[in-house]
Image (spheres, rainbow, N blue to C red):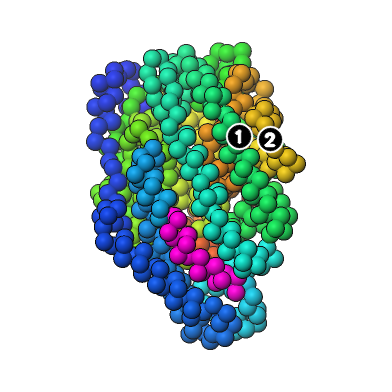
Amino acid sequence: MAVFLKCLTNDLLLNKAEQSGALAGLPDWDLSDLYSSPECTEITNDVNWLKTECKSFAADYETNLSTLDDKGMLNCITRYETIEQVSGRIMSYAGLRHYQETTNETRSKFLIDKQDSLTNITSHLIFFSLEINKLDEVKLNRLFNTNKKLNRYKPIFDRLRTMRPHQLSEQLEHYIHDLSTVGSSSWNRLFDETISGLEFKVSNETMGIESTLNLLTDTDREKRKSASLELAKVFKKNIKIFTRIHNTLAKEKSIQDKWRKMPTPQYGRHLSNHVEPEVVQALRDAVVNAYPKISHRYYEIKRKWLKLEKLQVWDRNAPLPQEDSPLVTWPVAKSTVLDAYADFSPEISDIAKVFFEKNWIDAAVKPGKAPGAFAHPTVTNVHPYVMLNYLGKPRDVMTLAHELGHGVHQVLAASQGELLSSTPLTLAETASVFGEMLTFKKVLKSATSKKQKRILLAGKIEDQINTVVRQIAFYDFECKLHEARSKGELSSDDINKLWMSIQGSSLGPAFEFMEGYETFWAYIPHFVHSPFYVYAYAFGDGLVNALYSAYEAGCPDFKQKYIDMLKAGGSQHHTELLKPFGLDASDPKFWELGLNLISNMIDELESLDDL
């Protein structure tokens, strides 16, 4: 830990050769636990097995679900689970290889071919959820009460049956299923290939989007400005294609929502997250009402520290005065996170350690690699993989802690099996944000000066603003975008105006916005891949802040309760998972707990001497 703090506070500037050496030895994925190669016989065998089994499954159960007894229904659901596992293994392998090199045509073709193949094969299964939703409620409950092994799968049936009012005919569901490979999936792929292929020239150096975005945290204000202007220039040059992608996907969603009788564009996401719309609205309102005491207040402090009349967009994530940003080497990042995890729970640290030992992490920034970071669970009889774009920034260490939290959660939940291990998005961020908090608190506790403490606190506050305030602002932008698209085609200027309509209110009066910032909606992948995903970050952060408050307050048996919660995966509703901690997300005061934690950090920051 002392080494990490030294990295945070030393006064040495590394030249490019030293930077390259500091980031040497970053791990690459070893995907052989999924398949040894794209040409291996195991993939061919699994695809052939799926062809046979999906046809056989349909022959055995289509139109017959209502006649099954408890043992027959259990056999049906376990066969379905195995199909999900085998198909998930194939698509995980194809997808992870693609994310390593999204501009590699061979890898893209492999992914597309497998998507097309599995879409055709699994079309035989469309009847399953449709017929589940037609089953008599009384009879279904009788089956659950008769067989404990079957009763374990009841949450799956409950979730499927929430779609009963929104289910289409079997013929239409088949049509939507078959169309997906040339519909949303194709537009998603176009977005990925486009964004990964963009080139930005800053200080006579050509780089990809990840490295360019990273410059927005550089100590040199002119470099941050140049990066921002270059991002705006390239986004504007490509804005028509991003506008087309968003128009098409929003319209496609609008059409499906209309046919499914979804009351709002957000409603389908709420159903998939197993969260009530009023709970999400309470979260959104609490965060928006807290803008003045959180983001507005913090950015005004930052404006004064930077001695600026107004903050520009390139100052939002700027280092503070006296804050150096030397590189944190990979070994230091690894030990920092594992030590923080171990202080809380050796069991959790031991699970995280395996990711390093067995090359379950792909960390280096590489040409064509997908931007951002994620932890992909793959399937429950293999293990998760973590992707990073590690550039050695202190915040990259927190990203490592975040994604390893996901990985640990996915490992612990795997015991639930393929159908019950996956958590809704609102709970998926629990372990990741908690892991970040553990790492932050350990580093903060080790700070030996007010300067170090200021820098660490400011960094954490900015991260939480990005997680809570920014994500709710993104959610409001999406709501406006889909509402506007329902009334007609949107021009690039239309979307730009919607984007800017939420920037001032969320960031506050300390900011003014450069020309070109109106296009910065274009690169955010969540809007394309997972509409309305973004509020899950704020949900997760608020939930974790409340959990961490309970931990610090000495909640009895907290660590075991926490591990049990992670092991539960998606087998329980958020109300049941939080009950052992005495917390209830449906209570509006619940969200105030998390927001007050951020506000209290700003209070602590203000109490320290001026920089």
At numbered mark 1, what does the secondary structure look like: helix, strand or loop? Answer: helix
Q: Position of residue 474 (x, y in %)?
A: 61, 38
For disc 2, the marked residue is 490
Q: Position of residue 598 (x, y in %)?
A: 57, 37
Q: Which mark is residue 243?
A: 1
Residue at 54% from the left image edge and 85% from the top image edge: 68
Quarter of the image where one finds residue 33: bottom left
Q: Position of residue 278 (x, y in %)?
A: 70, 53
Q: In this rendering, is residue 158 above or below 64?
A: above
Question: Magenta stretch: residue 129 in it?
Answer: yes
How many residues crowd mark 2 within 10 Å: few (<14), some (14–19), many (20+)?
some
Quarter of the image where one finds residue 500: top right
Q: In this rendering, is residue 201 above or below 587?
A: above
Question: Magenta stretch: residue 465 in it?
Answer: no
Residue 294 vs residue 384, the one in the foreground: 384
The amino acid type found where label 2 is placed reads Leu
Residue at 47% from the left image edge and 13% from the top image edge: 222
Report the magenta residues as a range. Answer: 115-131
Of the image marks 1 and 2, the number of the one nearer the N terminus: 1
At numbered mark 2, what does the secondary structure look like: helix, strand or loop? Answer: loop
